[in-house]
Amino acid sequence: MWVVTPVNPPPLDRTWPPTLADAWPRPASALPERVRTRVLRLVYGDPRAAASLAARLTERQAAGLDPLPVEPADLAPELLRARRRALRALPDDTRLLLLLAAADQYPVATHAFLRAVAAARLDTRCLESAETAGLAHAAAGGVRFADPWTRIAAYESAGPADRRDAHRLLARVLHGTGETARRSWHRGAGALGPSGRLAAELTAAADRARDAGDPALSGALTGRAAALSPDPRHRSGLLARAAVDAWDAGDGDRARVLAARTHGEALHGVLALRTGHAGEAFDALTAGAAQAAGGRPSARSEEHAGHLLARATEAAVYTGDLSRCREAVRLAGRLGIDPPGVLGGLAAAVEGRYADARELLGATAGRCGPGGDPTLLLHAGIAALLLGDHPRAATATHRSAAAARARGLVPPVSQAAEFRAYADFWTGRPRAAESAALDALRQAQATGQDSGACHLQAALAMFAALAGDTDLCRERAAAARGYALAHGLGLPAALAQWALALLDLGHGRHDAAAARLRALAGAGPGHGHRAIRHLAIPHYVEAAVHTGDTRVARAAHAAYDRWAHAVRSPDELALSARCRALLTPGAEAVEHYRIALDLHAQGTRAVERARTELLFGGALRRLRRRTEAREQLHSALEAFESFGAPHCADRARAELRALGAPATTGRPPESPRASLTAQQLRVALMAAEGATNREIAVRLALSPRTIDHHLRGVFNRLGIRSRIELVRLLAEEGRD
C-alpha cells in the first residue's frame, strides 16, 4: 500500500466567483425554491456548477414542470472541460490510475481499487503528479478526487477500451462475500455489446439488492441490464424498474427521465402522485391496479394491485375528491381484493355511514405495529388523524418513516412527516414539529416530491399562524396555494386557507376569518377539502359568533357534532361542546364550557384546550365571575407562552388586564433561542457566524429576500436592531 500526505487542492478554475454570495446570479435566484434545491443536489452542492446549470435550464425545467438534466456532461460542462484540460497534461500511467479509481467509485462504490492495483501490479507512484496538480490525493481506501467533476472527467475522458479494461479488472478482484452484485455491475460495464446472459445476471443481482433495501444499487444494476438487453420489450420493463428504483432512492429527476421512456400506467401514476396532477395520478393508479390484477392471478399480483389502490386513495386524499374513493372500492370488488388502508373507511364516511367509517378507520389505525409496510403504516396514521387519535397518528407516521429507512426508501420518509405535522401541531409541540417539517420540506424538494413539499409548506403556514408571524404565514400559504391550485391538490390548498383564517382569528380579525372559512366550505375538489373544511368548523363557529352571523354556523356545528359522536373522540366532542357554548347566550354557556374542558382533559389537543380556556375565561369575565375567569385565563396564558403563540398569549393578557389581574404566569423569561421559530433560529445562527444574506440563501436554498424577512423577524422578536447585537445576545446565552 502506498501512502501520500493528503493536501487540499486549490480551485482549478479561477474564473468562477470565489464566494457563495455570488453563486446565484439574478436569473437563478428567481427559480422556485424547490427547483433551486434540486439544482444544488444534482451538482453535489457546488454553487459554481449550480449557477451554470440554472442559467441553461429550459423554461419548463426552470418552472419545475420537466425533469432537470441528470447526465454529468449536462450538469457542469464548463467545469468538466477545465478538468479534462488539466487531466490531459498528466502522464498516461497517471490517467489510467485515475480512471481505475473513478470506475471504482461511481455510480456504484465498490472499494476494490487497492486490490485491483495489487492484482495488476500497477505503479502507484504515478499518482504523485495528480497530487502536485491538485487533482487527487491518496486516502486510506484509495484515491480522493479534488471534487466530483474531476472524478467524472477522469472516467469520461478515457477511451471506451480503457474503460472496459478498468471495469474488467475491478470485476476480477471482487470475489468476497457480499460482493456479487458489484462484480456483476463491473462485468456489465465491461461488456462489448448487448448480452442476454449478462442482462439476466444483472437483473438477478438487482433483485437481491432491492430486497436488501439498496434501491440505488438495484437501480444502477437494472439500468445496466436494460442497456445490455437485446429484447426491446424486456428493455422497456427494465427501464420501468430502474425508474422505480431511482424514485425509491430519492432521485426524482432520473426517475422521471427514465419513466418518459416507458408506458406503464402504474409508474406514471406513482410519479404523478408526488410530482404532478393528483387527479391524473388517481386515474393512472386505478388503471395500473386493474392491469396488475388482470393477468394471471397470484398473491403477488393481488398485493401489487392493492398497493396501487392504496396509492390511488392517497391521490383522492390529496385532491380532496373523496367521492372517488367509492370508485376505488368498486374496482377493488371487481378485482376480488379487500379495499386497502383508509379506502374503505373514507368511502363509508363519504356516504354518511359514520358508524361503519369509524369501525373501518379504527381497524386501519390499529395496524400500526413496528416493522410494517411504510404505505400501510402511513394509512394507519391518516386513519388515526381522522378519528382524532393524535398519539396513535404520531406513532404510526413515525413507524412509517422508520420502516421506509430500513428498506432504503426515501420518499415515504418526508411523506410521513406531512401527516405527522398535524398531530404535532395540535398536541402542543409546534417548535419541534416546525423543525421536523422544515427538514422534511428540504428532503421533499431535493428529491422532486413537489406535491409533498406543497403540503409541508401549508403545514408550516399553520405553524406560522400559531406563532402569529403574519408575513411568514402569508408567504408559506401563498407558495402552497399557488402550486396546489395548479396541480389539483385540494388538501394543501385548503390547509393553507385554514392557516390564513387561523392567523386572522388569532389577531381578532373575525370578519376576515369567517370569510375565508366560508370560502373554504364552498371550494370543490382541487381547491378545497372535505376533511379540512370539517376540522375547521370550530374555528368558523368562533369567528361567526363574533360577527353575529350564526345561522350557517349552527348548521355547520350540527354536522360536526354528528361526526364527533360517531367517532367518539374526546377532543372532537370537546370542540363540539365549545361550539355549543359559543352559540349559547349568557350564563347557560358556562356548563357547555365545563363539559368541553372535562373532555379536553381526556384528549390530546393541547392547543385547542388552551383556546377553550381563553374563550371560557372571557365569557366568565363578562359574567363578572372574576376568580374563575382568572384561573382559566392564567392557564391559557401559560399554555400559549409554552407553545410560542404570542398573539394568543396577548389576548389572554388583555383579558386579565380587563379583570385588573396580573398578566404574567410567573414563568422565567424565555431565552432568545427558545423565542425564535426553527427557521428563524437557523438563519440567526448563520448570521451570527458572519454569513451574508446571500450566503445564507444559498445554504438554505431560499431567496435573499426570504432571508431578509427572517432576519427582520429575528430582530423584532429579540428586540434588537443589528447583527452585532445578535452576536452578543447569542454569545451571552451560550455562556449562561
Image (cartoon, rainbow, N blue to C red):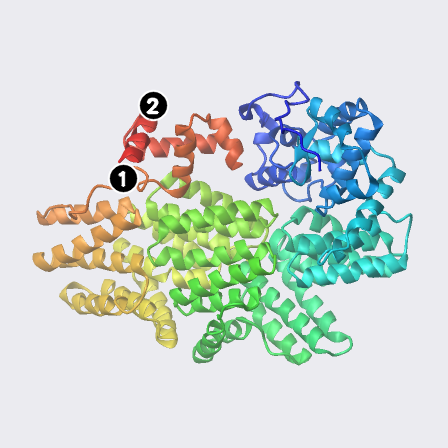
**Is residue 624 in view?**
no
Counting from the top left corner in percent of width and height, residue 672 is at: 29, 37
Could you tell me which residue is drawn at 79 percent across and 24 percent down? Answer: 90
Counting from the top left corner in percent of width and height, residue 199 is at: 84, 58
Give left or right: position of 554 versus 63.
Answer: left
Mark identifier at residue 724: 2
Above or below — where is 95 with respect to 272?
Answer: above
- Number of marks in picture: 2
Q: Residues within 10 Å of mark 2 (few under 14, many from 20)?
A: few
- Residue, disc 1: 671
Q: Which one is in front, 137 or 27?
A: 137
Counting from the top left corner in percent of width and height, residue 234 is at: 84, 61
Spatial CA distance of label 1 from label 2 is 18 Å
Q: Which one is in front, 604 or 62?
A: 604
Amino acid type of the residue tagged 2 in the rendering? Ile
Where disc 1 sits, the SS reads: loop
Mark identifier at residue 273: none
Give left or right: position of 342 versus 120.
Answer: left
Above or below — where is 713 with respect to 81?
Answer: below
